[in-house]
Amino acid sequence: MGTMPVANAGSVTASPVFCVDIGGSFMKFAVSPQPGALVPLERVTTPATSWTDLASSLSALIDRHAGAADAAAPLGLSIAGLVDPRDGVATSANIPCITGKPIGTELSALLGRPVVAANDADCLTLAEANEGAGRGHSVVFCAIMGTGIGGGLAIDGRLVRGVGGVTGEWGHGPVLNTTVDVNGERFHIPRFSCGCGRSGCVDTIGGARGIERLHRFLHGNDETSHRILQDWQEGEAQASRTVAVYLELIADPLALVANVTGASVIPVGGGLASATPLIAALDQAVRARVLHRLDQPLVTPALRQEDGGLVGAAVLGHDVAARMKEA
């Protein structure tokens, strides 16, 4: 298993929290010596199909970087999957070895330290609420707009975790409009089938594949989302029509999210967050629809896009460490 050293933990003297961002291909390992600080340490391949190998890999990472004083340091995990807050059982298509496992409980017993886990969208939400675009805001809704649509909710810097670990999933539910008026034209949009089993979900249109699907429906030709957005910025007619319809469709449910949650900022993560003109246009469309009108941006690119999993996992770990001190 190859490793990629990034930094040395020898200079870390405070009692740390360890954190890992576990993706389907790689795990990123870091130490957080104190809240708000993060020292990346290694990146290793993820043994996604073997629970024994995954636990051994995490144990080896800690052994390489933990000192004698770090024996009880908590470990926070960000995983590409769901974690049920009732029993800690994980479900992940990309990391099948953790599916059905109470991942925190089992790893805590194996590693001899407290282990807490949340999914990657929730960890990005924590990162943005505590150390990103949502810092200083009481209610932060993080909208994930990548291949598909996801989200998370934090209040006063703490994650809101619903039944089954599902919170902030604004991508699912048959809520999309089927008729859109743009620049004097009326468009009738079908309720596309969603992977969740329903039709008309935001996930069918809102992500990168959704933009491509919408463009194909409107114009009968296939383009990548990157090409569509580039053409839109250059004023090309078909792409401009696609993006105009897209914004009308997506702004309504996102404005509803803002009204329901009371979020005063909505950081956007995922691949589409890098398309800053699109996020700026979405912000304008959403702010025109919310009840509480804001002068400052509401929808904005996430600031912790690159290290959000690690930062959020570190927040989880520090919360465990604080409770340990209080006990």
Image: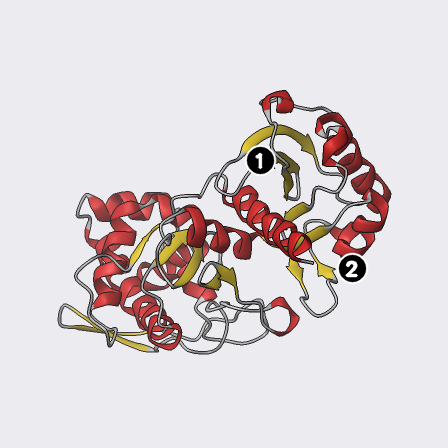
In the foreground, 112 or 313: 112
Q: Amino acid at mark 1?
A: Pro
Whether residue 194 can be seen here: yes
Query: CB under 8 Å between callouts 2 and 1?
Result: no
Residue 313 locus on image (x, y percent): 59, 47
Answer above or below: position of 24 versus 182.
above
Q: Quadrant of the N terminus?
A: top right
Report the residue marked by disc 1: 33
- Disc 2 versus disc 1: distance between alpha carbons? 27 Å
The residue located at (79%, 61%) in the rendering is: 100
The image shows residue 282 at horizontal and vertical percentages of 27, 59
Dot 2 or dot 1: first in sequence order is 1
Give the quadrant of residue 139.
bottom left
Residue 284 image-quadrant placement: bottom left
Foreground mark, 2 or 1?
Answer: 1
Horizontal and vertical percent for residue 171?
47, 67
**Residue at the limit of the structure toward the left, as seen here:** 184
Kindly state the secondary structure of the residue where label 1 is placed. loop
In the rendered view, tell whether residue 97 sits above or below residue 140.
above
Q: Which one is in front, 99 or 130?
A: 130
Q: Which residue is tagged 2? A: 102
Secondary structure of the residue carrying numbered label 2: loop
Residue type at numbered disc 2: Pro
Residue at 65%, 36% (x, y): give it: 26
Name the residue: 27% across, 68% down.
248
Residue occupying the far front of the picture: 326
Residue 1 makes an appearance in the image: no
Quarter that holds the C terminus: bottom right
Tell me the crowding category of disc 1: few under 14, some 14 to 19, or many 20 or more residues within 10 angstroms, Cα based: some
- Residue 68 x/y as whole percent: 77, 30
